[in-house]
Image (tube, helix red, strand yellow):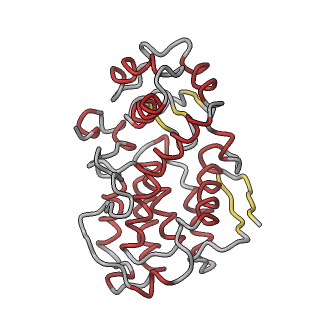
């Protein structure tokens, strides 16, 4: 079932289609399946280059956790009051949007009897809501305990890549975008998911395509990315929890104005007024 149909519109902001990212190399998020221009693919390193991927993890962590130390977030868990129940881990897996359930199921498939396995029935029940029923009072404590296990850390990495990172990079390459554009897609799908609601990633992209073409369709990369970020800001302002758009305004647009389409270091930016630097 598409999780967007099981959740309220507010909850569906981070919903994901069940098949999203199953095949990392071939996943396409939009309806258009246009071959990327060879020249665009050859320019610079993609976001899946290990060094660029590390930068992407730090950029997202600066916005999600106010820290560049993304690996310190395996143990993170709290209810931030956004209607999605518990938010946890390196990418903000949520008990109310299904990605936390998928993560714990993967961990249990790999390591039966782990400390979180007993919560699977409760996670299935609360999916699509902000309820803690069957999770309190010990779930946060047990999450932090599981986060000390390298198997759980790897499961978080793998689910992040399967559901968010790999599909975003694949679509970015298909659109002929370099590392910055691929990151803009990744950051958008992390926040908004890829459900059917108007502010999902696919519909942000469709909104951008109404006013500009990506390089793979003969358009200018900077012009298209500005259109995409305009559409992203519109989507963020539709929900109070995401109304601060600094992760676009004082981060991604800073790189774009400098023409840093390959996300080359050094990088300097701000999120929520805090300054960050990657040398």
Q: Is residue 252 above or below residue 101?
A: below
What residue do we see at 40% from left, 65% from top?
Answer: 170
Question: Residue 269, can we see it?
Answer: yes
Q: Position of residue 57 (x, y in %)?
A: 60, 54
Residue closer to the observer: 230 or 171: 171
Asked if residue 182 lies left or right of residue 215, the reply is right
Q: Residue at point 35% right, 81% down?
A: 216
Q: Quadrant of the C terminus?
A: bottom right
Residue drawn at (36%, 37%) of the image: 10
Task: Tell me the quarter of the image containing the N terminus.
Answer: top left
The quarter of the picture where residue 4 lies is: top left
- Label total for image: 0
**As drawn, 219 above or below 150:** below
Residue 114 placement (x, y as % from top left):
52, 22
Q: Position of residue 95 (x, y in %)?
A: 43, 29
When the figure is inspected, residue 53 is found, relative to residue 111, above or below; the finding is below
Can you say whether 111 is above or below 72 in the image? above
Q: Position of residue 251 (x, y in %)?
A: 61, 62
Q: Residue at the location (56% across, 35% down)?
A: 151
Please say whether residue 236 is visible from this viewpoint: no
Q: Quadrant of residue 271?
A: bottom right
In this rendering, position of residue 43 left or right of residue 4? right
249 or 276, which lies in front?
Answer: 276
Q: Quadrant of residue 234?
A: bottom left
């Amino acid at each position: 079932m598409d999780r967007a149909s099981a959740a309220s519109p507010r909850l569906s902001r981070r919903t994901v289609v069940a098949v999203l990212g199953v095949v990392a190399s071939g996943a396409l998020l939009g309806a258009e399946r246009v071959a990327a221009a060879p020249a665009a693919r050859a320019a610079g390193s993609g976001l899946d280059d290990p060094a660029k991927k590390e930068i992407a993890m730090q950029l997202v962590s600066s916005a999600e956790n106010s820290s560049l130390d993304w690996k310190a977030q395996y143990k993170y868990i709290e209810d931030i009051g956004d209607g999605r129940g518990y938010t946890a881990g390196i990418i903000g897996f949520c008990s109310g949007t299904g990605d936390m359930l998928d993560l714990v199921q993967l961990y249990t498939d790999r390591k039966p009897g782990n400390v979180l396995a007993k919560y699977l029935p409760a996670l299935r029940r609360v999916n699509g809501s902000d309820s803690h029923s069957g999770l309190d009072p010990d779930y946060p404590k047990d999450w932090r305990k599981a986060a000390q296990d390298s198997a759980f850390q790897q499961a978080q990495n793998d689910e992040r890549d399967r559901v968010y990172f790999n599909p975003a990079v694949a679509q970015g390459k298909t659109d002929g975008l370099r590392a910055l554009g691929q990151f803009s897609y990744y950051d958008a799908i992390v926040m908004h998911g890829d459900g059917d609601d108007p502010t999902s990633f696919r519909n942000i992209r469709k909104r951008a395509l109404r006013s500009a073409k990506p390089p793979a369709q003969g358009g200018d990369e900077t012009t298209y990315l500005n259109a995409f970020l305009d559409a992203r800001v519109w989507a963020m302002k539709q929900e109070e929890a995401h109304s601060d758009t600094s992760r676009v305004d004082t981060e991604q647009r800073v790189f774009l104005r400098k023409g840093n389409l390959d996300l080359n270091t050094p990088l300097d930016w701000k999120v929520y007024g805090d300054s960050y630097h990657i040398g």
